[in-house]
């Protein structure tokens, strides 16, 4: 598999283009979601670039820390770095910009660190809203992250690979794979914190929870990292859903053409998922944290059963 990794100038170009795509698309898609929800509610809605305008305004502001705790300042930086690294481990076209053996563990770790950063941020200040939000985030992490781990374990067993390149390229059409795909779509929704599962922030209840004391550039970094994490989760799901194209396009036509076609299929799937999730979000009210935890536990048990089925060769 190492022979398929882009190297030299081609590798640098792929990394640069992938980073530009990762950094540019999430705020744009967030703006699209806001427009779509406004249309569903018969409102005009903000401009498509409104999220970019908001982030730019935040990045231009100063940020006063209400505490001397170093974790308060470092948390948004760690969250952004983790989200970007997780996104760079995913394939854009036929290959990811960064890949190595066992990188699926790094992917799980980086996605988890975004949530852990929010927990640290909430507990680093003496604010009841921040503490409640951090507690909620911790409960969701303890029940949601294991589901993501089980999903990736099933994909790893199915493809006989522990790298994101392998689990997107070498999946085999088995009953266990068909059963795990709905759970993959579910955990992507949960971990992306779409309504009704944005319980940790809950702007109308606990004033954005762990982020209540943040402002200016630090708040902008946190908001940006959450958008990139959402992008990474949906892009992972999109890459897995179009897995048959890898085998088909990898052996037909020029390499560049197959790369572009695969990327186009990924983006179309990502855009469709984002649209469907936005529609679901606009059609639901926020859940209580205990209801989300109960459902996560049930899905986790179902994932374990599918993992056992995968281990038996099915």
Image: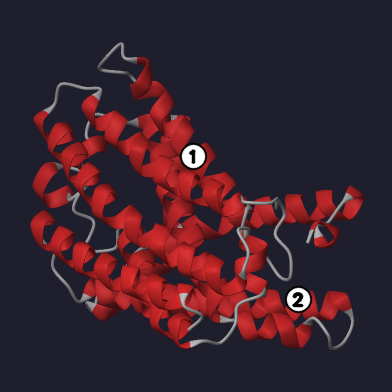
**Compared to 297, does 238 lie above or below?**
below
Task: Find the distance from the CA under tag 1 to the CA under tag 2.
Answer: 28 Å
Say which mark, if any, is on residue 80. 1
As helix, strand or loop, the secondary structure at mark 1 comes to: helix
Residue furthest to the front? 312
Depth check, front residue: 45 or 24: 24
For the point 86% across and 76% down, which residue is it?
255
Q: Residue at x 30, y 78 (%)?
A: 279
How many numbered marks does the figure carry?
2
Q: Which residue is mark 2?
A: 260
Residue placed most toward the observer, 59 or 183: 183
Q: Is residue 94 left or right of residue 121?
A: right
On the image, the x and y values in percent for residue 222 come to 39, 39
Around disc 1, counting alpha carbons within 10 Å, would you say few (fewer than 14), some (14 to 19), or many (20 or more)?
A: many
- Sequence-wise first label, 1 or 2: 1
Picture coordinates of residue 134, whole percent (x, y): 21, 37
């Amino acid at each position: 598999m190492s022979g398929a990794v882009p190297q030299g100038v081609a590798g640098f170009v792929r990394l640069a283009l992938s980073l530009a795509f990762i950094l540019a698309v999430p705020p744009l898609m967030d703006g699209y979601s806001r427009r779509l929800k406004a249309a569903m509610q018969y409102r005009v809605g903000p401009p498509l670039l409104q999220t970019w305008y908001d982030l730019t305004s935040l990045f231009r502001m100063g940020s006063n820390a209400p505490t001397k705790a170093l974790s308060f300042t470092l948390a948004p930086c760690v969250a952004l770095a983790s989200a970007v690294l997780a996104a760079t481990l995913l394939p854009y076209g036929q290959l990811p910009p960064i890949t190595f053996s066992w990188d699926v563990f790094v992917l799980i770790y980086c996605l988890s660190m975004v949530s852990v950063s929010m927990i640290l941020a909430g507990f680093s200040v003496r604010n009841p809203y921040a503490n409640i939000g951090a507690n909620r985030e911790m409960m969701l992490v303890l029940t949601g992250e294991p589901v993501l781990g089980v999903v990736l374990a099933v994909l790893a067993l199915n493809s006989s690979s522990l790298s994101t390149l392998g689990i997107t390229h070498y999946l085999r059409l088995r009953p266990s794979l068909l059963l795990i795909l709905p759970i993959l779509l579910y955990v992507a929704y949960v971990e992306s914190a779409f309504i009704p599962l944005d319980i940790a922030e809950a702007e109308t209840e606990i004033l954005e929870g762990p982020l209540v004391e943040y402002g200016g550039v630090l708040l902008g970094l946190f908001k940006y990292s959450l958008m990139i994490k959402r992008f990474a989760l949906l892009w992972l799901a999109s890459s897995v859903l179009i897995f048959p194209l890898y085998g088909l396009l990898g052996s037909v036509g020029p390499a560049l053409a197959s790369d572009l076609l695969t990327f186009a299929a990924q983006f179309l799937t990502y855009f469709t998922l984002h649209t469907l999730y936005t529609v679901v979000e606009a059609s639901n009210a926020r859940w209580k944290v205990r209801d989300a935890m109960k459902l996560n536990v049930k899905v986790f048990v179902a994932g374990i059963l599918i993992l056992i089925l995968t281990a038996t060769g099915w």
